[in-house]
Image (cartoon, helix red, strand yellow):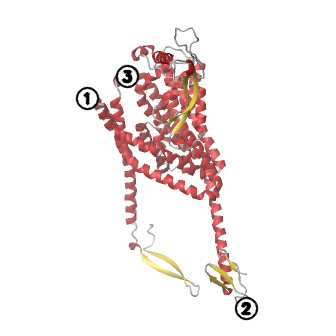
Amino acid sequence: MPHLHTNQILNFSEINSANKMQKQVEVRIDEGHLEPTVETTESACSSICDKIMKNMVLTLTILGVFMGSIAGMLLRHISPLPPDVIMIISFPGEILMRMLKMLILPLVVSSLVTGLAGLDAKSSGRLGTRAMVYYMTTTVIAAVLGVVLVLLIHPGNPKLKANLGQGKKNDDVSSMDALFDLIRNLFPENLVQACFQQVGFIVKAQFAANTLKLEQQIRLFLLLFHYSYLPLQIQTVTTKVQVPTNRTKAPPQFTIKRSLQFKSGMNVLGLIGFFVAFGVVMGKLGEKAKIMLEFFNVLNEIIMKIVGGIMWYSPFGIGCLICGKIISIADLEIVARQLGMYMLTVIVGLIIHGGIFLPLIYLVIVRKNPFTFFMGLFQAWVTALGTASSAGTLPVTFRCLEENLKIDKRVTRFVLPVGATINMDGTALYEAVAAIFIAQMNGIELDWGQILTVSMTATLASVGAASIPSAGLVTMLLILTAVGLPTQDISLLVAVDWLLDRFRTSVNVVGDSYGAGIVYHLSKHELDSFDAQQSRMDDFEMTKNKSYFENNTNQNVYSHHNSILIDDCKVTMGKNGNTAGFSFVEEEPWKSE
């Protein structure tokens, strides 16, 4: 408070209800009696406490990562631990993953509906267009960066194949089947089933039972079991295998047939597709859907409160998760020496993409410090590093962007769920490096057409990768099949995938977060204009209701002298004051007759 005078003058206005006269009263108060310092101290203490509480969770999470890594390294030097002990060590981390995944479904549903219902169709379309352009641009950049690095560093060496040995045989995957499965999952036939199952192609062997005797069926089974002629999943072909027999009649035949089958796992893509449409249509309904919108808003607030409680448990869970994973890896040192250059190539690429390219894009478009933005989402980055699941990190990412970075909830609630499903920058880079590394390890020279195919397929395959741990290994089958590389060598990379999976997941989360910041910056003017328009409409409705209420009040006062209230109805008297002629009128609104 400025010290201009010794005393301060306060004016109070009172209105006399009897004569409607306004009186001015001057009260002189000495400045020494005004002591706002108590409130200032309390507010300063509360703000400091709030900062300590927020940073405490982050500090404990980082400490949990380091303690889990150190404990895992130390326990590896003890004699091999029994599987039960490893399971007990990893159990708190498993509980953390289950709690985070438990919140994915209600969080995705409530966030998409509330985010899109708060926008008109035009704003939603522009928001989605900007997000998709960002997703595809950064994913292509990541895939090209991975190809360039693996060609420059050249980590693959045919000698590694002799040291690592032959990998396990994997099933071939058709790119066409994978694309159609992606589209099928986008339109689930049963919304409840989509919460825990996905649809996909499988291949079965069928033969005519009436042409085979029991002995021939047994011999056919033993033949398939011994030589493994029949893969579980193959392209659309029809194969005929002859069964050895001494008889002169034609040997029996069997046919490879494809069919659809449901497999376990949440169909996040299908849920997103449905609830995006649900939110857009609900936004068009306006006041009719107000109750439904309030329900989803409250649901979202409840989920975020639960996330805040889980965050206090996450440091312990992440530490146990990392410790148990390090202990369970066999021959870690040997594999690290053999695949060290491959790991270095992937990690360097992820650092360049997540630490240089993404911040540079944010700086060019938003023109703000990208590292200040990164510090706001540091908690989400550490959680992704520990859990290796971008979907599991989604609740924490929401909390960081909305509370720390103050990004509009309508942007985060649309961009983050979609980004956690289809924006996989780290996965695209990893798959491109792994595919060319396998080619180098087998001594196969890829031409520029095949390299371009690897880049494009890695971009598209990352879109179809589920936001779960180690999903990149599954989608990498598409890339190897597309360029004719041996798929069995994927199993050789599993030994180090647990570590690389954490790094690429953290880059995926950072890419989603930077995307939300960029989309919010580009859409901020439209959102403000939409809010101003909505505010003007609300003010107009309020003024209209107030005028309507005043008119009804005046009419009720005017007609009070010849009206009588009887059981919530109005009885209108006749001109002579008699009740001979009267009529019953509903209470709302009353008008003089």
**Nearer the observer, disc 2 or disc 3?**
2
Percent across and percent down for residue 61 are 37, 43
Question: Which type of secondary structure does the marked residue at label 3 adopt?
Answer: helix
Residue position marked by numbered label 3 in the rendering = 335
Q: Earlier in the sequence, mark 2 or mark 1?
A: 1
Residue position marked by numbered label 2 in the rendering = 576
Question: Which type of secondary structure does the marked residue at label 1 adopt?
Answer: loop
State if disc 3 and disc 2 touch (CB < 8 Å): no
Pick the front one: 5 or 309: 309
The residues bearing labels 1 and 3 have C-alpha atoms spaced at a distance of 19 Å
Residue position marked by numbered label 1 in the rendering = 78
Pick the front one: 63 or 219: 219
Percent across and percent down for residue 147 are 53, 24
Percent across and percent down for residue 423 are 54, 36
Q: Residue at x 49, y 13 (%)?
A: 443
**Nearer the observer, disc 2 or disc 1?**
2
Relative horizontal placement of residue 393, taking residue 568 as reference (left or right) = left
Q: Quadrant where the C terminus lies?
A: bottom right
- Residue 356 seen in render: yes
State if disc 3 and disc 1 touch (CB < 8 Å): no
The residues bearing labels 2 and 1 have C-alpha atoms spaced at a distance of 108 Å
The kind of residue on which mark 2 rests is Asn
Q: Quadrant where the N terminus lies?
A: bottom left
